[in-house]
Each structure stands twice: as structure tokens, then as C-alpha cells.
Amino acid sequence: MSLNKKCFAIFFLVLSVFQGMAQKRTSPEKDSILTENLDEVIVTATRTVRQLSSLPLPVTLIAQEQLQQTGVTRLNEILNEQTGIVMTPDATIGGGEGVQIQGIASDYILVLIDGVPVVGRSSGNLDLSRFAIGNIKQIEVVKGPSSSLFGSEALGGVINIITEKPKNRKINGQVAHRAATFNNQNTTINVKQRKEKVGYSLFIDRLSTDGYNLAPGNGTQTVNPFFNYTFNGRVFYDASDKLRFFLSGRYFLQDFDIPSGTSEERDANAHLRVDHRFSEKSRLEYELYYTRYSTNEQTFDPVNNDILLDNDFDQRLFRPEVRYNHSLNSGTLTVGAGYNFETLDRSLFADQVSFDSQYVFAQYDFKPSEKLNLIIGARFDNHSEYNSQLSPKLSARYDLNSNWALKGSVGSGFKAPDFRQLYLDFTNAAGGGYSIFGKEVEAQGIQRLQENDEIANLVVDPSELGERLDAERSIGYNLGVAYKKGKLRADLNLFRNDFENLIDIRILASKTNGQNVFGYINREAVYTQGLELDVQYKALENLNLSAGYQLLYAYDKAKETAVENGEVFARDPNTLQTVRLTKEDYFGLENRSRHTLNLKAFYEVPKWGANANLRVVYRSRFGLTDRNGNDLLDEFDDAFIKGYALVNLSFGKRFYKNYQVQVGANNLLDFKGNNPLAAQDNKVLVNPGIQLFTRLSIQF
């Protein structure tokens, strides 16, 4: 059954369940919209306030206290310590890291700040190291398809960075400075105040480093020196008990010191939200959001000063949205509608391009009985460049008793073809003259090359050029059990994510110079499946222990079938003989580890104002790419990075009530490791080794 048919099947199931149960009246529940003082509350999973322990969805909450005690300063650092979330090196696209959730690549993970999306995926990955966490209240991670609420790019999950609100009537805040290895200097200033109807906050962060070189002797640095600034100002105004305003502005600037070149990055956004409460049960939210991300990157030939690379990137998004929440006797109804207008001006494109889309969504979160909670939702997106998408989702939680609960969800997600896959028009003169064309410009690109007598052979039928790309789609399943009693909490989740129409690169033509012309096509079908286990235990009054484990299998369906049919071969490096691969020889998708594990211990001594924490993150071996030419990652490839553990440790001590000193070490065991894709005489390491830090903060 195709994914679209599955989506409609889920949608009609949703409707039937809704019609059958919505009329059942139970004893009145406490209004989930009005309940804002619960411990560990989540807003991302349902776009309403819900208690974490009551949700039917797999959700990770990273609280402010954990952020402060670990001593980390950037979003990517803290995410890497969570179960089922991995920061993966991107060795095939030119460096950097991407976030992976349940084996789903970073291209398919939506990142939000206070509920609105950030942009800036110049090559698929979103650089999470540009997000400072000094003014964050909590980070919420929803695993699995979330397009029923958030649309495109939420195919694999959502990460929502939620900033803190001012509460104190007096001016208060924090000034802090952190110094670390590689002359890494990080200064933050956070000022906030809440007085009667008005609240405000101002956050400033500066980070700089000398960079580091993991391959001495090659003449260049692995990470170049850079500095960046983050400015975030927010204003809260309560006009009355029924009308509230929120205004936020954020600006980020980063500049790399690159020999014979320049590299500058800017990220800015403005966010206005109006909360209009009509009654104790009804509320409207109006939201207006604008963001712009731009880069300017140039590389020069140091001899004759010729430009070798000119890569300007300027992406803008404008989005108004309105949401309506209404509390019923048995639950909460949420409906909404919005509009996206997005433009991209890039030097690798022939012209400036734009998207626009309209969407509507609805969700009903209700309890047909005292022990059963159901969440039914769907979203419809109408886009200018691809077929309309329907994304339904159904989640359920059943409390067996006060200690045990069953929970599960099934839903669909989608990701629209991005600007690069539609409009890229690039010829790499420095790389031998290969060309890449997006789907919307490939016909014109091929025609232009033919007119210039640069095409030796057209590989595809001319009628296939310019055929519309479909949105990539997924169906995600999560089934789990939760246990809570006394000092022990445990969650076990089984997951399966099936993807269709994944966009892949194919050869369109061969050039007269021996190079190829590449384009994009919907082709791949893959899946990820496995289990996640989270355990938390309060061993002593001030000692909290936790552990998390993920088992992951991730395969390309077509390649898995080819292996099972005995159609794939490889050369055994030990015997130097060609052998037919078996299912056990096929390792799976690149950059996925079979096993990941984290162990954490947080200890506090309140009478001394001291705390300590130890965090261990283990990742089993993973492969970077196919190296033996059979188009899949198998046990005979020499592209594997061995499993490793990162041990992070920090201590904190408060003095004179308002002063705190923190010292620590990330990667305490000094793990480095080699990149198997690097040249034999110029090994490039995966990790820079141990990183020591100290931090002084002053509260006022």
C-alpha cells in the first residue's frame, strides 16, 4: 500500500474514532489550556500545555537546571547526550554535524525557537552550534512524524527551543564568562524583569575560538578561528486578563577567519504573538513571524587572486498563523491556519526563487474514559511547487493503573523538495567540470549544454527532464510502555519509520570532458526501526541517576531486496576473492550506529552550594560511505569509524550566594579517532580530544 493510501486510511480511522468517542461525556477534566503551573510541562507535542508524564507520544524534555549544571553552551552539545538523538559527522558533504533522531537524518528534523521555524539549510544540515542556550527555559524534542501540526521538515521529529520568561519584579539576571581549550571564550549577559503588566529580557552572547587542526602538516585548519554574537530581546505585555502580547527579536552574526577568503553568516528573526482569551474555555492566538538567513563565502587563489568559490545564500521566510483553542468537557480542540512565503537568492541559482503555501490543521485531545487519552489530528498543505499533502496522526495512552501505562502513535510526515533540489544550477570548474541541475531547471540546463556542444551522451529520456518531484513522505509508528513508582521512572518505546519518494541524485548525461551532469529524482524507499529505553532513578535525596539506550536498524529497501536475492557482490579484503553478500553483510544506511547509550549522574550538596555531574555517551561503530563500488555499505567496506565513548564531567560551587564557579572536562578520556575517508598520509581525526573549561557566573 502506498504512503498516500496509508495516510487516507489513517485519516478515515481518525474520523471514525472521533465520531464514535467525542460524544461520550466523562467527568469534567481540568482545563489543559489554563493549567500553566504543572511540573515538567510540554507545549510542542500538542501545541497546548500538557504534563510530560501524561503524553502518549515519545518526547524528551531537557530542563534549564540540566543545561546549567552540565556547563555546555550550544544546542548541539546538549542534544548529543539524549537517548535516540545523535550528532552525526557529515564527511560526505564537506564537514559539520547534523542531528539524527531515531535514525532519521537532520534534513527531516524541524527546529523551532519559541514555536516558530529557523531556516538556513544551505546543504541539508542545519548548524545547531549557532544556537546559544544561555537564556533557554527548556528544550523539547518530539520524536517521529509531526507534520500533522508543523508541516514540511517535521517528517522525522521536532526540536523546540523555548526561552525563559521574566518573573521577578526587580531587575535580575546573570553575567558569565567561560574559557575553554583552543582559546574558546564565551561571554553571556542575561537581563530580565517583570513589573506589573510589562516584562522584558535582553540576552547577549559572544563566542570566539582559535580553532584547531586535526591534521598537522596539511597547511589548513580543521576548524578555522571564528567569532559570533547572538542578540535576543523580548517584550511581554499583558493588556488585560484576556489580552497578552509577546514580541521577540533575534540576531546572530558569525565570521570565520579563512586564509585567502571570507566567510560570514547572519541569522535574524522577528516574532509577534497575540494571545486573546475570550472566556475560561476559548482562546485565539495570532502569530506573525519573519526570518532571514544569509551567508557570504568567497575563496581566492592566493597566487593570482582569482575567485575559486563564490557562494552567497540569502533565504527569507514570512509566516502569519492563527490558532484557536477551545476546552470541551472531555478535552481540548485546536484548529489553525497559516501562510508561508519563502524566497531564496543564491549565487548557485540562475534567478531568485520563491515558494508559497497555505495550510490548515485540526487536533482534538480528549479523554473518552478516565484511563484513556486520545489525540487525533490532521493537517492539509497546499504548496506552489508540489502536490498537496494530507498529514493525519493518531496517538493514544491508556493508564493500566497508577504505575503502568501503555502509549502509542501512528502518523504521517512529509518534506517538500527544497530550493536546491528544484533550482540548483551549478557547474564546478575547480572539480573538473561536473554539473548539477535542480528538477525545475534541468531541461533548460541540458539544452544550454547541448547548444554549447558539451553533451556527449544523454542518459535519460528527454521526456523525463523537468518532471515534477513529489514530496518525500513517511509513516511513523511508536508503541511504548511507561512505568513510574516512587523513585523509579522507566519508558520503553518501539519505533518504525517507513519512507517513500526520498529524493536521490542520478546521472542525466555525460559530458565531452568526461564528467557527468547530475539531477534529482524520487527513488529511494528506506526504513528505520528499533527501540529506546529511558530509566531514571533517585538513588539518594540529592543524587539522580539516569540511563538511556537505543537499538537501531536502518536499511534501504531496494538494496536490502537485492542482497536477499543474491544480486550484490563485494571483494573480501582478506581472501581477495569476490563473494556474494548475505543479509548479515549489509550493514545498512550510512552514519547510523546500531547501539547508542548514555549514562548520567547528577549530585547536589545544598548546604555547600555545590553540585557535580558525570555524563557518558557511547556510540557503536558506523560507516560513512560505500567504498567498494557496490552502491551500499557492507561489512567489506573500509569506511567504518570504531565505536567510542565520550565522558563529560563538571563541578559547580556557589560562593556568597550570587557567585558560582564551574570547572569541567568534555571528552575526559581524550578520544580522537581517525576518519577513514581521509588520505592515508594525512589522517583527519573525528574528535579534537579533551576540552577543559572553567566558568564564572554572577547572579544579580
Image (tube, rainbow, N blue to C red):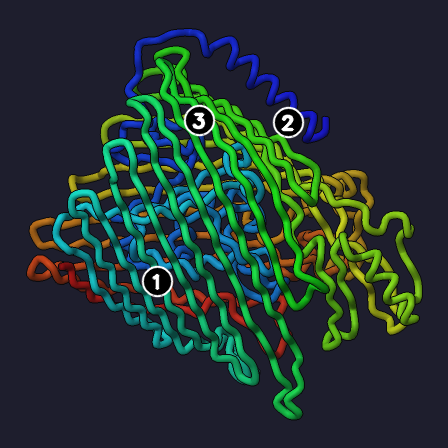
The dot on residue 7 is 2
Tag 2: amino acid: Cys
Q: Quadrant of the N terminus?
A: top right
Relative to 201, residue 281 above or below: above
Q: Nearer the viewer, mark 2 or mark 3?
A: 3
Q: Nearer the viewer, mark 1 or mark 2?
A: 1
Res 614 seen here: no
The earlier-in-sequence mark between 1 and 2 is 2
The x and y percentages for residue 13 are 59, 17
User: At numbered mark 2, what does the secondary structure look like: helix, strand or loop?
Assistant: helix
Q: CA distance from mark 2 to mark 3?
A: 20 Å
- From the image, tell me which residue sits under label 1: 231
Q: Which residue is mark 3?
A: 334
Left or right: 158 in relation to 384: left
Q: For this rendering, which residue is in front, 509 or 84?
A: 509
Q: Position of residue 565 (x, y in %)?
A: 80, 39
State the residue at coordinates (50%, 22%). 376
**Residue 205, x across and y down, in percent:** 32, 65
